[in-house]
Image: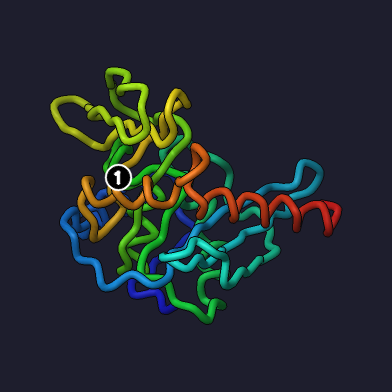
């Protein structure tokens, strides 16, 4: 995959926030999706004992949800964790992995936030804008916003509201299981994002993209004894 937007990564907090605000202007919140054949899931795992990390990309067949390609990259942590600047820590190794894949995805699902972010530019937005590819944020937990609990059945959803703005959906992917937090990353509407997350989560709470990427980084960390 080719990165369409280049920028420095060695930024201080003030510079990173300014860049987020600038790049947020490029986020597209309407459907601009091609025919989707391949969907990517991305994940990063950190060593508890060293500064090493593993980034993984898995490519799933959109129709069967079977994994058709997977890539891992070993790297070192380049920046500390700062609230609201998660993407500056995670994306450099993820980009390295995406640049190695052979089956280019038409959609990327991130285990993180998109518009549901203080500056409306979570990791899913950042990744989507850099590659100019449709992207969805599907987080396990809430970063910003308030909501009422959705219904208990699969497919029930309630708005995630920050201030006076809907920034995402609280989506029940399985009946009587904790919901996930879905938000637009880039080039997709919230309604379509919800539909895709449901399609990608036929049996479990989390979409298969997230589950497969998580399993891959854990397996690789164990094999490398990190």
Which residue does the image show at 69% across and 47% down from the upper left? 46
Q: Nearer the viewer, residue 42 or 121?
A: 42
SS of the residue under disc 1: helix
- Residue that protrudes farthest toward the bottom in the picture: 102
Nearest the viewer among 144 and 118 is 144
* Residue at position x 27%, y 57% in the image: 186
Q: Position of residue 171 (x, y in %)?
A: 34, 34
Front residue of 82 and 114: 114
Residue 188: percent from the left, percent from the top? 23, 56
In depth, the one of 10 and 87 nearer the eye is 87
Answer with the quarter of the image where residue 167 lies.
top left
Residue identifier under label 1: 194
Q: Residue furthest top?
A: 148
Which residue is pictured at 19% across the width and 33% down the height? 166
Q: Position of residue 71 (x, y in %)?
A: 62, 69
User: Is 111 displayed left or right of 165 in the figure?
Assistant: right
Q: Which residue lies at the image location 34% right of the left edge and 75% below the top edge?
A: 4
């Amino acid at each position: 995959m080719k990165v369409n937007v280049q920028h420095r990564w060695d930024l201080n907090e003030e510079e990173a926030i300014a860049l987020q605000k600038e790049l947020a202007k490029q986020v597209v919140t309407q459907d601009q999706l091609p025919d989707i054949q391949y969907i990517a899931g991305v994940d990063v795992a950190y060593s508890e004992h060293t500064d090493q990390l593993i980034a993984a990309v898995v490519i799933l067949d959109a129709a069967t949800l079977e994994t058709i390609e997977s890539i891992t990259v070993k790297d070192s942590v380049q920046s500390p964790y700062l609230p609201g600047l998660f993407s500056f820590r995670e994306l450099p190794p993820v980009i390295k992995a995406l640049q190695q894949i052979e089956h280019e995805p038409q959609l990327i699902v991130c285990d993180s936030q998109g518009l549901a972010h203080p500056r409306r530019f979570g990791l899913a937005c950042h990744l989507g804008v850099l590659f100019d590819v449709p992207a969805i944020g599907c987080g396990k937990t809430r970063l910003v916003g308030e909501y009422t609990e959705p219904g208990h059945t699969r497919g029930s959803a309630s708005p995630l509201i920050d201030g006076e703005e809907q920034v995402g959906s609280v989506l029940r992917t399985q009946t009587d299981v904790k919901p996930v937090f879905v938000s637009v990353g880039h080039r997709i509407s919230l309604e379509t994002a919800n539909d895709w997350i449901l399609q990608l989560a036929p049996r479990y709470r989390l979409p298969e993209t997230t589950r497969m990427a998580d399993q891959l980084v854990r397996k690789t960390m164990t094999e490398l004894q990190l």
